[in-house]
Image (tube, rainbow, N blue to C red):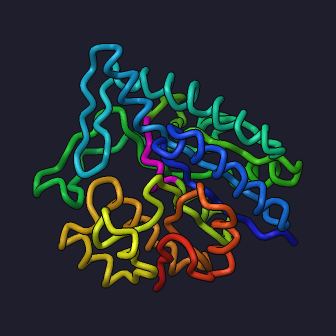
């Protein structure tokens, strides 16, 4: 029986041609080694660029985007349009039978509107994130059906309510729930940086492994900051739910994903309980 890997792709990864090609090659490498793969992507930089073209100002708190109704339209256009199509095409070039879709497709990702909430790094007051949803269900039967058809789902991070309302959803939160729903064997969080570093300007300062206690310390020290905070916090929750391997890694290095799958420690930062 094939193992399941869930890969979260940040929009920053897709801005660079070498990153895109490396990512696609690494996903193909997993598939060639009998893994089934589900890809979930965001598109923060692409959303920012399109917002600016529409005269909108990106607004984030602790790495999480506040989304007005006008912003939501841009999010839909950027991630379900530009990013999803281009990533799907890049995978097809490498021989991966990628299937582009989004959270509203077949109610893949069901979500409810998020109430005002206090978030780490966002101060003590509850924050209203606007047209942002919290995931309440993953259509794992549909995902498994797609995998059984030997296609690789490439999912844009939008959620849909039972009433048909569309919400912007946090990719880091969502990918964790997808991994849990599928009982995935491997979760890869890809970024252009490719790991957690004590000093971002010093490649030799890569932190090879982090446990929950260390993660809290690194957040408090400001080493883990911005968008990396929700990545780490959400991924740590999976360690108690049976996901064997979780890592923050770059897709640009040949063999990186298989190396992480085998827990060899050659790339990225492994998250451990």
The picture places residue 82, in percent across and down from the top left corner, at: 57, 26
The picture places residue 107, in percent across and down from the top left corner, at: 64, 39
Q: How many labels does the image show?
A: 0
Name, please, the residue furthest toward the top. 54
Q: Is residue 121 left or right of residue 264?
A: left
Name, please, the residue furthest toward the left. 124
Q: What stretch is highlighted in magenta?
A: 168-174
**In front of the other: 70 or 262:** 262
Q: Is residue 65 left or right of residue 159?
A: left
Q: In this view, does 173 lie to the left or right of 213?
A: right
Q: Quadrant of residue 128?
A: top left
Residue 169 among magenta residues = yes
Q: In this view, does 80 lie above or below 16?
A: above
The picture places residue 103, in percent across and down from the top left corner, at: 59, 39
Residue found 47% across the figure and 77% down from its top: 271
The quadrant in which the N terminus is found is: bottom right
**In front of the other: 260 or 62:** 260
Residue found 19% across the figure and 45% down from its top: 127
Residue 30 among magenta residues = no
Residue found 35% across the figure and 24% down from its top: 71
The picture places residue 212, in percent across and down from the top left corner, at: 36, 81
Q: In this view, does 207 lie to the left or right of 145?
A: left
**In front of the other: 153 or 10:** 10
């Amino acid at each position: 029986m094939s193992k399941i890997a869930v890969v979260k792709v940040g929009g920053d990864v897709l801005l660079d041609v070498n990153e895109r090609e490396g990512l696609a090659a690494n996903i193909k490498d997993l598939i060639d080694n009998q893994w089934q793969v589900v890809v979930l992507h965001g598109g923060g930089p692409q959303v920012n660029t399109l917002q600016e073209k529409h005269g909108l100002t990106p607004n984030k708190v602790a790495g999480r985007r506040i989304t007005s109704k006008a912003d939501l339209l841009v999010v839909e256009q950027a991630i379900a349009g530009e990013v999803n199509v281009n990533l799907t095409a890049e995978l097809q070039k490498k021989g991966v039978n990628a299937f582009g879709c989004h959270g509203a497709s077949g109610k893949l990702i069901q979500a409810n509107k998020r109430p005002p909430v206090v978030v780490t790094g966002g101060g003590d007051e509850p924050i209203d994130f606007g047209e942002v949803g919290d995931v309440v269900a993953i259509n794992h039967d549909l995902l498994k059906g797609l995998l059984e058809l030997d296609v690789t789902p490439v999912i844009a991070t939008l959620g849909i309510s039972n009433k048909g309302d569309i919400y912007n959803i946090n990719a880091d939160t969502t990918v964790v729930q997808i991994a849990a729903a599928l009982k995935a064997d491997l979760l890869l969080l890809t970024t252009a940086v490719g790991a957690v570093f004590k000093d971002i300007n010093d490649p030799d300062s890569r932190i090879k492994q982090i446990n929950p206690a260390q993660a809290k310390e690194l957040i408090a020290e400001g080493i883990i900051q911005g968008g990396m905070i929700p990545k780490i916090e959400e991924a740590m929750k999976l360690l108690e739910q049976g996901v064997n391997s979780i890592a923050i890694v770059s897709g640009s290095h040949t063999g990186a994903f298989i190396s992480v799958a085998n827990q060899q420690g050659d790339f990225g930062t492994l998250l451990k309980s």
